[in-house]
Each structure stands twice: as structure tokens, then as C-alpha cells.
Image (spheres, rainbow, N blue to C red):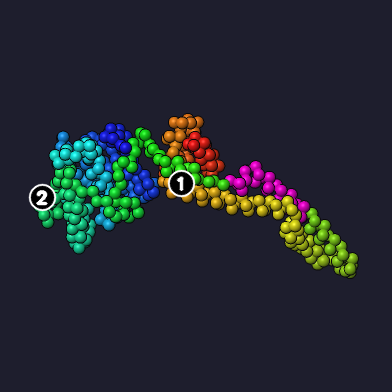
Amino acid sequence: MITKNDLRNDGVEYISGKTQITARYSNNCITVSLFPDYPKTEQQLSLFLKIDGQNTVTITDLRDEGVSTTKSGYGRLIFNIGIQLLHLYFGSLKTPSIANSINILGKASPQSDLKLSQKEKILNIQYREKFWEDSGLKYVEPNNPHSEIKATLDSLNIRKEGLCGNGCSKFIDINCFWSKLRKPTFFSDDIASLHKTQLNTDKILSADELISLDKQETLAMLKAKRISQLTTILIMLIILTSNSEYLFTSTFLILALALYFISVYLLSMKVVDFISDYKDSKERKAEHSQGLAELKKTIETVEESNNGLIWRLHHELIIRDPKLDTETNKRLVKQSKEQFFLSISNQYVDYVEYINKAKAILI
């Protein structure tokens, strides 16, 4: 559970799927930022709640950058977070009676409508009025798009129904947030997910084994080439002895050389298929490729379905075993947090080692 001090320090954070939300109190203002296409940061929605004195909050801005607040539901989500943070800040979660003495002020602003058509402006004004009134704020001057809006904290409404444009809920409990200083804590479900994770490496070959198989194939190809050369020479001798009248003519020599190289190449391709070392190498490489594809897919599925599993576990794991806090593991954890799952699966050797160590620690 986050505290008021968490807001004052480095702030708090929530990440799930494509949704990242951060909040922090600084310079008498609570700033809530929503990134709906995490880990990308091009799209951002920010809510600014200025704390004026002991009992007044001014909504100074609800700013969107590349995010449609009117149709996406992100405006509702970020304001729901803002309401909860205000209750946390003023202590009205523990003492609800405080909330009716906290004044919430603001001003409806159609500034973002300037580039819209008249029809679109009217629709946006209507939406904005409905949004603030549904949130519990009243227009001081009804039908005035520039009207001041006001309410008390206890009259603000948290609307929990519906989903946002990226599929996340319009309501997220702030108890799901964590302090940026402490990082996320994991739950029993995370430990269960860890121990259910089965990373099958039976078919995976090491780099040395793959090099050995390459050498095995090369030797098999050389063997096939020698067999093909001897076979071709034998055939040509038979032809020569039966057609001695053409022997050593320029036409014959050109045809003979062409036949030799073509025959050696074609025979090599056929003969090598019957050499057991070559067949064994190809079969083991095919099994390796299939096993590797399955392992990578499993890693990506585990990470995605758990919103970055090793990132969620890492903070607690390094407390129990500081040896896990290596540069390699830090890189994996960072990619897990930022949801670069494909990049993680390409480091399957390090990932499998991390998961095995984590299982041994979190028995």
C-alpha cells in the first residue's frame, strides 16, 4: 500500500500491459501521468492538481499529447486516479469526514477545440460538460464553455465501469501502485506463476555442440565429394575406352570437363544423404531449431502474461541473494519492465538460468 510519503519522495508507479501511470507530489502539486502505449512515451496524458493551503485543490490542467481523451476513456482513468490520490493526501481514506471540507476548483477550458470545426467544437463542449458533471463537479455558469467548476472532495465520483482504448480498465485501485523507491512487490500468484513455468531445454544445443555438428557436416560433405569424384572418373574411363575416336579432341575435352564437375556436384548432393554423420547432424539441428522456437515462445508468453515476471520478482530476490544483482540480470529485468519480450527471449540462456535460481530461492 502506498503512502503520502511515497508521493512526496520519488513518486509512485503502476505498469500493466500497455499502461503505465506515474504520480508524484512536488511544489504543492500532484502530477499524474498516463502512458497508454507503454513502453513508448510519445502518447501522454497528464493531470495537474495544485494544493492551495489546507483545504483547496485547483485542477490546473488535464493535458493530452497525442491521446484522444474524448473517446478513449483515458481521461476517466486518470481522473479516477487523481481522486484517490487526493483522498490519500488529505487523509480522508482513514477519516472520511475530512473530505467534505476539501474544496475542488477548476475551469472548463475549450482551448484544445480551436482547430476543430464548429460541429466538432459543440460536441467537445457537450462531452466536456458531461465528463466534469459525471465526475461530481458543477458548472458555476451552465452552458458557458469557459465556466468555473467546483465541488468538494466527498462529492467527486469514481466511475469504475468500462475499458480504455488500449483495453485496460477505467478504474485502477491505487493500492495496486508501488513506490518507485521500493519497486513492485510480488504476490503469491507471482510465485505460483514462477513455479508453473517450465522451460524445456532438452533439445537446445550449446554453441560448442553446434560448431561440432558443423564440422561433422563438412567432413561428411568432403567424404561424399571424394566418392562422387571416384565414381565420375570411373564412368568417364568407361566412356573413353568405348569412344576412342573422339579422344583428346577439343570438343570432347570441354564436354568431359563439364560432365565431370556437374556429375561430382550432383552426386555429392545425393551421396551425402546416405552418410549417417550428415543425417544425424541435420536431424539434431532441426530438433534444436524446433526446441529453440518453442522455448522462446514460452519465455515471451510467461513474461507477457505476468506483466514482466522477473521484473516483479527481482527486487525481493536480490534481497535474499545479492549475487543475482549482476549486470546481465539487470539488463534482463530492465527489458522485462519495459516489456521487450522478444529481446528477452533471444537471451534464453541467461533467462533460463535466472528462472532456475529464482525457483531455488522462492521455494
Measured from the top left, where is residue 321 in percent x and y? Answer: 48, 31
Front-lying residue, 178 or 10: 178
Q: What's the magenta region?
A: 201-225
Three-letter residue code for mark 1: Glu
How many callouts does the rendering have?
Answer: 2
Is residue 300 placed above or below 57 in the rendered structure?
Answer: below
Q: Is residue 166 magenta?
A: no
The quadrant in which residue 247 appears is bottom right
Measured from the top left, where is residue 313 in percent x and y? Answer: 44, 38
Front-lying residue, 249 or 167: 167
Secondary element at image label 2: loop
Q: Which mark is residue 33?
A: none
Q: Is residue 87 visible?
A: yes
Q: Is residue 298 left or right of residue 91?
A: right
Q: Is residue 106 left or right of residue 251?
A: left
Q: Give the overall secondary structure of the magenta segment.
A: helix
Secondary element at image label 1: helix
Give the spatial CA distance, label 1 vs label 2.
49 Å
Q: Which residue is mark 2?
A: 140
Q: Residue at x 27, y 57 (%)?
A: 71
Q: Residue at x 28, y 38 (%)?
A: 24
Measured from the top left, where is residue 223 in percent x and y? Answer: 77, 52
Three-letter residue code for mark 2: Val
Q: Is residue 41 visible?
A: no
Q: Is residue 118 left or right of residue 81?
A: left
Q: Which residue is mark 1?
A: 303
Quadrant of the frame with the N terminus: top left
Q: Residue at x 16, y 46 (%)?
A: 155
